[in-house]
Image (spheres, rainbow, N blue to C red):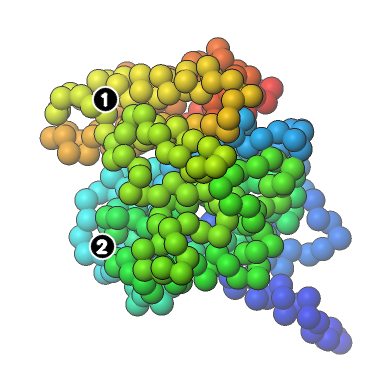
Amino acid sequence: MMLQTPTLQFLADKALEEILERAAPILGEFYIAFIPSRLNFVTGRASSVPPPKTAHWMANVPDETRLVDMNLPGTHDCATWNYSAERQAELEKYTGPLRSHVFFRCQDRSLLDSLDDGIRAFDMRLGYNPGEDTIGFYHGRALLSPTTSFDDVLFGLYHWLVYHPTETILVSIQQEEGSLTTYDEKFEAMLHASLTTPVAQQFWLQTKGRLGTLGEARGKLVLLQRFTYEFLPALGETHEYGIHLGAAKWTPNGADIKLVYSAEPRRVAYIQDNFMPLVPHNSGPDANISAKFAVVTTHLDKAISTSSNATEALYVSFASAHANRDTVPVTPNIIALGDGAGTPGMNERLLPWLTERKGKRFGIVLLDFYHSQPALVQTIIGLSM
């Protein structure tokens, strides 16, 4: 049998295959659907099943729609989906002993699955990988993959966008304060380099101080900058593109945070990030979930009542929370899913509330374990079931 002569395309496919294999613990397994003319060299997986309508839901939204006026479902601590008890045990040689994995895990769907499910905003928490040669992913002290780099995952997102050119992805980036890795000039320089490569310049929306329209953002990532350049004075505080929601301006456990991300013209982000409900210690699941639900729906009501014709107002609501310091901890999965003993979680409570207001403006809604209520994402974006 005569062997085929290797081509540049073959080399490119093999290089991408290696990147996506490294990215898989954070990104998920990649496959290409409905490309019958091209073998999938990436994972060997093929699919004859049509992608769900949520994988390309933005195709039906007019180009002139401002991103601040859209309903964008997202995932809080998106990279934690693969953090099982077994995975934690594997990684303790890097982190030392940690509390149970349930304190750190907030998702059960990979980034790629989430994109196909209609998720369009990712909350990413970064720190040094072991050896401090690459930047990787954390939740608190929990290292999520020692071999997957931020660059690897970005390439996976770029690749997804190539096959979904009608879509856009908002990416919130911050250094994870509890990761116990250093935040220094080297980290900032590496992060800046990742966001300014020639490839990044093609795939990140290159506008600064505004989110713009969906037409401008199709096929691109949009930066929500939750870090500040402290050690690279030539850059100033803000990145060359995206909007700056710096950590110093982000009120810890804030139920009603107001951040001006553009002074002239004035553009404001209104953020609810009440991650520890303000109830007495040891109040139990129902009190914590009820308090969080009240805070979330109050903030969503503000988004609904704000005219879409108003000065660009970005609304961000975190549905995630915990009471991990209680004697019997109320962990993120209990807040999202309930206690399994009759107390409904945030997702179950939010679905009917959102359904009653379907088609209203909610802004960005960041969820934990959203797939427990499969209709939740579709209700946020207003798709028919």
- At x 41%, y 68%, the residue is 233
Is the Cβ of the residue at disc 2 closer than 8 Å to that at disc 1?
Answer: no
Q: Write down the quadrant of residue 32 in the picture.
A: bottom right
**Where residue 287 appears, x then y in whole percent?**
25, 20
Number of numbered discs overlaid on the protein picture: 2
The amino acid type found where label 2 is placed reads: Leu
* SS class, disc 1: helix
The amino acid type found where label 1 is placed reads: Asn
Image position of 246 with respect to 43: above or below:
above
Residue 241 is left or right of residue 237, and the answer is: right
- At x 62%, y 24%, the residue is 308
- Seen from the viewer's position, the closer of residues 321 and 67 is 67
Residue that carries the numbered disc 1 in the rendered image: 288
Residue that carries the numbered disc 2 in the rendered image: 180
Residue 264 is left or right of residue 86, and the answer is: right
**Where residue 118 appears, x then y in whole percent?**
62, 38
* SS class, disc 2: loop
Q: Earlier in the sequence, mark 2 or mark 1?
A: 2
**Image mark for residue 379:** none
**Where residue 157 appears, x then y in whole percent?**
61, 56
- At x 59%, y 25%, the residue is 310
Res 23 visible: no
**Where residue 36 appears, x then y in whole percent?**
84, 56
* Front of the two marks 2 and 1: 2
**From mark 2 to mark 1, how far is it between C-alphas?**
28 Å
- At x 63%, y 52%, the residue is 207
- Seen from the viewer's position, the closer of residues 66 and 12 is 66
Q: Write down the quadrant of residue 17 in the picture.
A: bottom right
Residue 373 is left or right of residue 125, and the answer is: right
